[in-house]
Structures are given as C-alpha cells and as structure tokens.
Amino acid sequence: MIDDKRMHLPALMPAPARPASHGRKSLPELPLRADRGVQPQTGACVKLVRTVEVRRASLTATPRAALAVALLAACSTAAAQGLRLPDLDEPWRPACCSLAQAADDTQAPAAAATDVVSDADRRFRTRALVGGYAAGVALYGYFSWWGKDVQRHVVNDDGTVTVETLPNRTSKFRFSDEGWFGTDSVAGGADKLGHAFAFYTSTRLLTTALSDWAGQPRGDAIGLAAATSAAVSLAIEVFDGYTLEYGFSWQDMAMNLLGVGAGVLLETYPRADQLIDLRFQYWPSDDAKKYGETNPFNDYSGQTYLLVFKASGVPELQRNRWLRYLELQFGYGSRGYSPHPGPYAPEQPVKERNLYFGVGLNLTELLRGTVFKEPSTARRVTEGFLEYLQVPGTNLLYEYNLDD
C-alpha cells in the first residue's frame, strides 16, 4: 500500500481484581437524563464519591481525585440520551459498566505498561521499535523499488518499439507531478489512498506497540508514532527522488501526512475510533491474474479503500439487538490502471474510477457475541486485523463509475 506506482480514552474494561478482604462492590448505575442543563443526580454522585474514597483509602491521592472528577463529570454531563452521535472527547461505556470502573479503567492500560517496564527497558524497546520499523521499510524499499532495474519503451524512427533496461537509481534528484484522482493520475488515485492508508496503519500500530509493549505513556506513544511515520514517509519520497521511475511526489507526501493525521485523530479520540474505521479490501483482479501480478500491493485493480461508520459506535444503536451489527460504508477504487500490459500492448484494459457505498457486517461485533465472549489473545489479534481489513463478501456495495 505504500507501493507508489507499484505502487480511548481507551475502551473501558472491568476494574482490576482486588483481594477478597477488601469486600469492594461495583457501584450502581446512575439514571441518565436527556436534559444537559439539569443535574438531578449531583447529590447522589457526591455520596458515591465519598463511598468510593473510603473504600479505596489505599490508593494515592491522584487516582482518588480522578475518580471523584469522573463521577461528578458523569453526572453533570449525563444528558443526550436521545439518538445522537457520540462526543469525540467522552468515553462511552456499555450500560453494564459501573462509574467506578470507568474512572479506574481510563488510566489502566497506559499506567499498567508504564509501571511494569523499567526506564532502561522502555528506552531499549522504543529504539527497537522505531529502528526496526525504519530498517524494515528501507530493506523492503530497496529490493522492491529503488534497487531494481526499470524497462522503458523506445519508439524507433521506423515506428518499431524496443524495450531497454536501465538501472532505476540515479544521482540526479527529480520531482514528479503524479496528479490526484484524475483519469491520467497514477493508478487513478488508488495509489494516493494506498499512501494514506499505509501511514495511517503504521501510526496506529506503532502507537499500540509503544504504549503496550515499550511502556510509553499513551500521549507520548501517539506523538512518537506519528513523528516516526512522518519521517519514514519523507525518507521514502526522498529516495524516490533519486530514481528514474518515481521521483519525489508532493501529492504522495501530502497523502502520507493525511494518513498520519487520521491515525493520530482516532488514537486521541477513542469515541471517534468506536464510530469510524478506515479499511482495506482486496480481491485479486482479472488483470492481475491475466498478467501474473497477484500482489495485493501492486494490484490496484483489486483494491478498495473504505470509510466505515459502525452502528455499534452509537450507544443507542449498540444496544439494539440487530442494528449493532450493521455498518455504513463508503469507498473508492480504480480498475484497469495497474497491473497494466504497457502502453504499446495491442489489448488495453478499460480504465475506471469507481465510488462505492453500501452496508456491511460488523464482524468484530458479531464475533464478540459468539466466538469471543471472553477477552483473549485470539480475540485481540482477530479484532486487530478486522480494524484495518475488510473481509470480501461481508459487505454489499453499489458501484458508481466516475468515467461513464
């Protein structure tokens, strides 16, 4: 997907288990009002705050204060229970979760990782992740893009066409104007979405690895992941500038940064992440099978990029037995651009730029209610894949051809 012309607060979890001697019970759920301006539960919240502080006397002052603020904030903002889209900066919790658990869990993931990992290990793991990612991209780029030879078609004076092979690397830096999503742009614009999606994915995956494995605080992990992805994307374009085939493309660079920004947005606002997914769908195209290039990164004719709105991200729809599994999807894909037999081939594929919209099945939500009812490594890995990949056959999309 980088292949140029080849181109939440976190979701809330149950509070940590405590020894039986503490005898702590979950706090009752508070009724919510549809009127933001009225706060009839404030007194009850104060009482709950005091109760929780007594029962959690062993905690430090900071978690107790955070708990109190969270409880009062929940009461003072307990409106908008009519059908509405979620606020980006508020954590949504299912009705089964208590307010006390909500306050505990907002800090749990990052705090747990930070407490377990020593400073020395944190630095080592961070360098390993950042360096390993950069080195991996560099090796892949050299063998797939920059280090290969390129073929050029040369039209002779007698009208015949010959093919010459040249080294792709050059000592002269050059720029390339590839266009955006026009009919004459590289891969009909699918290449640009590939750039954005690649660095959106790298930003999010790096954030998770830096936070959960390297032990970086959540905010630091997001910033470092974004900076690393942006720097790597710039390095790729600079290396492209020293090739005959590619060149430095400012359109590619802009889409790289757009992808990084989208990753930062969804990592910073988990409520938005609960509502929105950006996904990649692939099915080998007929052109790829015909020309023997069934590589998902090069087969733009088999790629579709999707913007997904999940019903499960709206609290009222999430509680609906059936609607919670539905998604509204919008997408874009090009056909007939790449793979391509070359401009002088006798048969040329028909080029299309298509918009897609329709509905899909939320496999993550479906599996949570069937196969993965309890948290597990298998569930986490599966949901990680489904966060970024759309399984073919799980959506129904209408195609609109922009070139008709």
Image: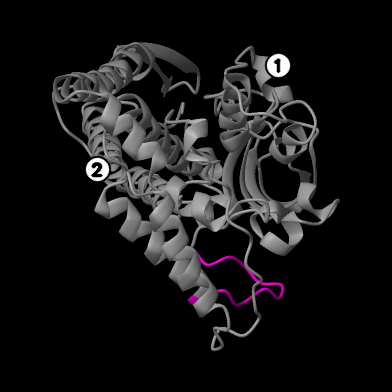
Taking the spot 39% from the left edge, 49% from the top edge, the residue there is: 56
Q: Is residue 287 left or right of residue 37?
A: right
Residue 297's spot in the image, x, y percent?
Answer: 52, 24
Q: Secondary structure at mark 1?
A: helix
Q: Is residue 352 left or right of residue 167?
A: right
- Few, some or many C-alpha atoms within 10 Å of disc 2 (few <14, some 14-19, many ≥20)? some
- The foreground one among 345 and 38 is 38
Find the magenta span and give its range: 76-88
Task: Give the farthest residue toward the bottom.
Answer: 37
- Few, some or many C-alpha atoms within 10 Å of disc 1 (few <14, some 14-19, many ≥20)? few
Q: Amino acid at mark 2?
A: Asp
Question: Which residue is under mark 1?
Answer: 290
**Quadrant location, the C terminus:** bottom right
**Label 2 vs label 1, nearer the camera:** 2
Q: Is residue 165 above or below residue 133?
A: above
Question: Which residue is under mark 2?
Answer: 220
Taking the spot 50% from the left edge, 43% from the top edge, the residue there is: 193
Taking the spot 46% from the left edge, 60% from the top edge, the residue there is: 51
Task: Give the farthest residue toward the right.
Answer: 322
Magenta-highlighted stretch: main secondary structure?
loop
Disc nearer the start of the sequence (2/1): 2
Q: Amino acid at mark 1?
A: Lys
Q: Is residue 143 left or right of residue 277?
A: left
Q: Secondary structure at mark 2?
A: helix
Q: Is residue 126 left or right of residue 318?
A: left
Residue 131's spot in the image, x, y percent?
Answer: 22, 20
